Image (cartoon, helix red, strand yellow):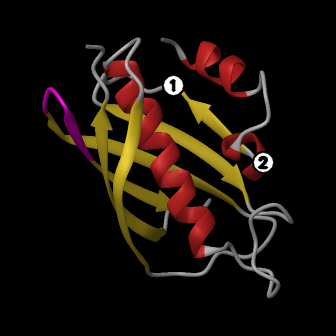
Amino acid sequence: MDVEEINRLIHEQPNLSTALGMEFISTPEGDTCMARMKVDERNRQPFGFLSGGASLALAENVAGVGSSALCPGCPCVGIEVSGSHVKAVAEGDTVTAYARLLHHGSTLHVWNVDIRDSSGELISSVRVTNYVVRPK
């Protein structure tokens, strides 16, 4: 599935990706996935900084898209998300999530997702485990 198809499917109906302003980006490697998100009123804290929960949602969504691309026709759901936030990002900036597949099992995928600000500085590092639901 190419990135244009992913973005089209995501925007067909309301969902978390569209609510938070995520846009998926093409990558050359099959075991990577990227998305970006502008920090704005949809995903910031009242203090004007990117919400840690929005960062985790971005990481889980980009890893989920990556697993879905690797397993067409199989729902892929996040079963564990754990992250460390190391820097604040102010409203108006854009963050980019880069997911790299660490483990590609038949039912479990483990991804490492680094989220960086527009200057390339690390904002959050997140580990996502997805469960691949295989048809019976």
Q: Which element type, helix, strand or loop, lies under badge 2?
A: helix
Q: Earlier in the sequence, mark 1 or mark 2?
A: 2
Residue type, numbered disc 2? Ala
Q: Which percent across, then down, holds residue 131?
A: 29, 39
Residue 33 sits in quarter = top left
* 104 shown above or below 95: above
Between the C-alphas of marks 1 and 2, the distance is 21 Å
Q: Residue at horizontal 43%, vertical 27%? A: 27
Q: Which percent across, then down, holds residue 59?
A: 47, 53
Q: Which percent across, then down, holds residue 4?
A: 64, 15
Provide the residue span drawn in magenta: 105-110
Task: Tell which residue pokes out farthest to the right in this image.
Answer: 41
Q: Residue at horizontal 48%, vertical 59%? A: 115
Task: Tell which residue pokes out farthest to the bottom in this image.
Answer: 47
Q: Does the magenta stretch include residue 3?
A: no
* Disc number for residue 26: 1
User: In the shown orientation, is residue 94 left or right of residue 125?
Assistant: right
> Could you say which is closer to the camera, residue 63 or residue 40?
63
User: In the shown orientation, is residue 60 left or right of residue 45?
Assistant: left
Q: Mark 2 points at which residue?
A: 19
Characterize the local packing of mark 1: few (<14), some (14-19) or many (20 or more) Cα atoms within 10 angstroms: some
> Could you say which is closer to the camera, residue 134 or residue 2?
134
Residue type, numbered disc 1? Ser
Label 1 vs label 2, nearer the camera: 2
Q: Which percent across, then down, holds residue 120?
A: 50, 61
Q: Residue at horizontal 19%, vertical 31%? A: 107
Q: Which element type, helix, strand or loop, lies under badge 1?
A: loop
* 1 shown above or below 109: above
Screen quadrant of the C terminus? top left
